[in-house]
Amino acid sequence: MACITLTRDDCIRRDVIKALICNFRLDFSAVEQQWGLHFAEYFTEDLQLLAPLAKRWTGGCE
């Protein structure tokens, strides 16, 4: 069986996805603290892609 080595990015995204699936929420500061990153900077492209969906879910409210 072949082994797959996860990158740091893979592990960060795994933890984010797991938190969303298990808790239905995400604590940005916990991710920042655990991984030593600034969430909004690290996930800039992802957050931009999700912005229209988030806006639709909240009815346009910020």
Image (cartoon, rainbow, N blue to C red):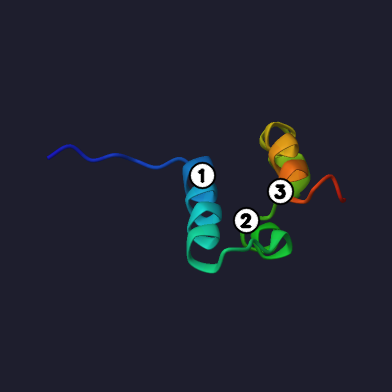
Which residue corresponds to mark 2?
35
Foreground tag (1 vs 3): 3
Task: Give the left or right position of residue 2, taking residue 6 as reference.
Answer: left
Q: Residue furthest left?
A: 1
The image position of residue 49, as x and y in percent, is 68, 31
* Element at label 2: helix
Quadrant housing residue 6: top left
Marks 2 and 1, the one that precedes in the sequence: 1
Q: Is residue 23 above or below residue 50?
A: below
Give me the residue at 23% from left, 40% from top. Answer: 3
Amino acid at dot 1: Arg
Quote the CA–CA distance across marks 2 and 3: 28 Å
Q: Residue furthest right?
A: 62
Amino acid at dot 3: Trp
Quote the CA–CA distance across marks 1 and 3: 30 Å
Q: Residues within 10 Å of mark 3 (few under 14, many from 20)?
A: few
Marks 2 and 3, the one that precedes in the sequence: 2
